[in-house]
């Protein structure tokens, strides 16, 4: 395995761990504030973490127009995915929402095929195993509502679009500027919606400050920035399978921090998702000469 590919995989696994741990902090924070208030606050924290790194780094090239436009586009897609999920959760169950959202692991290769991407058998097998494992991990999938399910399905489609867009148009942009721009867009749009449909309060923000800060710093600022960097050296489907392990790590953190219990089927689901990751690793995408040249190019 090429050293850059290995580094990308380790970064994507770190992303999955931070997103998985974010489930626990999200549950805690949502007890004191509405979903759009929470989104506005955590993405604002994410932007506040990244912005000083941009302003005070030694080499501070002026952000080009294309990078800013791509960042805004990614931010709108990210906000839409988050919004659809939150609205869907009003009328569907958490387990169904978790499963349907995780179907982006299948949506990414489908979008890739539509765009003419080459997919390895290992990546396709990994995506199918990850989706099957996710179904087992989510447990009881009954009790849904067609409107809620469709909204969450819209969320899954938009997350798949986000992963593919990062691969297609964000690879040569400034990762910090891209990340910060999309965070600012999500924070602003979420704040607007929060003031329309919720009643944000300083008391609620203060009560949920600790989980909110964890989510903003780790699950948003660090994780999404690492995603942009890692996807430069990881095919979209490969990246989606590794990032889908957030569900596994979320379950494990629930066991460790919230004293939750997993059934035998849920443990088996975790195993299937790890098997999907191994399929991607052991049966990888065969790179074209052009792709190999990109990996060995020291300037890239």
Image: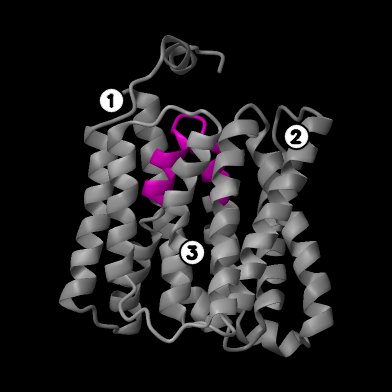
Answer with left or right where residue 176 lies relative to residue 222: right
Q: Crowding at label 1, few (<14), some or many (≥20) Cα neighbours within 10 Å? A: few
The percent coordinates of residue 9 (x first, y second) are 37, 39
| Quarter placement of the N terminus | top left
Answer with left or right where residue 61 lies relative to residue 90: right
The residue drawn where x is 75% and y is 63% is 187
| Mark linked to residue 1 | 1
Going from the N terminus, do you reach mark 1 or mark 3 first? 1
Start-end of magenta stretch: 224-243
The residue drawn where x is 27% and y is 48% is 276
Spatial CA span between label 2 and label 3: 28 Å
Q: Which residue is mark 3?
A: 101
| Quarter placement of the C terminus | top right
Spatial CA span between label 1 and label 3: 31 Å
Q: Is residue 300 magenta?
A: no
Q: Tell me if residue 21 can be seen.
A: no
The percent coordinates of residue 243 (x first, y second) are 42, 51
Question: In terms of secondary structure, where does tag 1 sit?
Answer: loop
The percent coordinates of residue 34 (x first, y second) are 67, 83
Going from the N terminus, do you reach mark 2 or mark 3 first? 2
Answer with left or right where residue 202 lies relative to residue 247: right
Q: Which residue is mark 2?
A: 67
Question: In terms of secondary structure, where does tag 2 sit?
Answer: helix
| Closer to the eye: label 1 or 3 | 3
> Which residue in the rendered view is the most extreme toward the left?
264
Q: Is residue 8 above or below residue 50?
A: above
């Amino acid at each position: 395995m090429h050293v850059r590919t290995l580094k990308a995989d380790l970064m994507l696994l770190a992303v999955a761990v931070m997103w998985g741990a974010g489930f626990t902090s999200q549950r805690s924070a949502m007890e004191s504030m509405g979903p759009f208030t929470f989104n506005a606050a955590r993405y604002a924290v994410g932007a506040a973490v990244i912005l000083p790194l941009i302003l005070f780094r030694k080499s501070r090239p002026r952000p080009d127009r294309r990078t800013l436009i791509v960042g805004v586009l990614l931010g709108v897609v990210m906000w839409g995915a988050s919004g659809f999920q939150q609205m869907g959760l009003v009328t569907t169950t958490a387990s169904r929402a978790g499963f349907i959202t995780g179907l982006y692991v299948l949506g990414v290769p489908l979008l890739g095929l539509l765009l003419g991407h080459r997919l390895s058998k290992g990546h396709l097998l990994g995506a199918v195993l990850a989706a099957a494992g996710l179904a087992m991990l989510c447990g009881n999938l009954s009790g849904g509502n067609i409107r809620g399910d469709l909204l969450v399905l819209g969320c899954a489609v938009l997350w798949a679009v986000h992963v593919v867009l990062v691969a297609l148009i964000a690879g040569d942009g400034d990762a910090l500027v891209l990340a910060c721009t999309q965070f600012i867009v999500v924070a602003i749009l979420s704040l607007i919606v929060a003031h329309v449909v919720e009643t944000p309060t300083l008391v609620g923000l203060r009560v949920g400050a600790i989980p909110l800060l964890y989510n903003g710093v780790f699950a948003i600022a660090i994780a999404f920035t690492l995603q942009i960097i890692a996807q430069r050296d990881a095919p979209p489907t490969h990246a989606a399978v590794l990032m889908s392990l957030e569900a596994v790590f979320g379950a494990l953190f629930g066991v460790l921090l919230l004293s939750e219990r997993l059934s035998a089927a849920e443990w088996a689901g975790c195993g299937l998702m790890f098997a999907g990751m191994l399929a991607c690793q052991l049966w990888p995408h065969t790179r074209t000469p052009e792709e190999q040249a990109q990996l060995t190019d020291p300037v890239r």
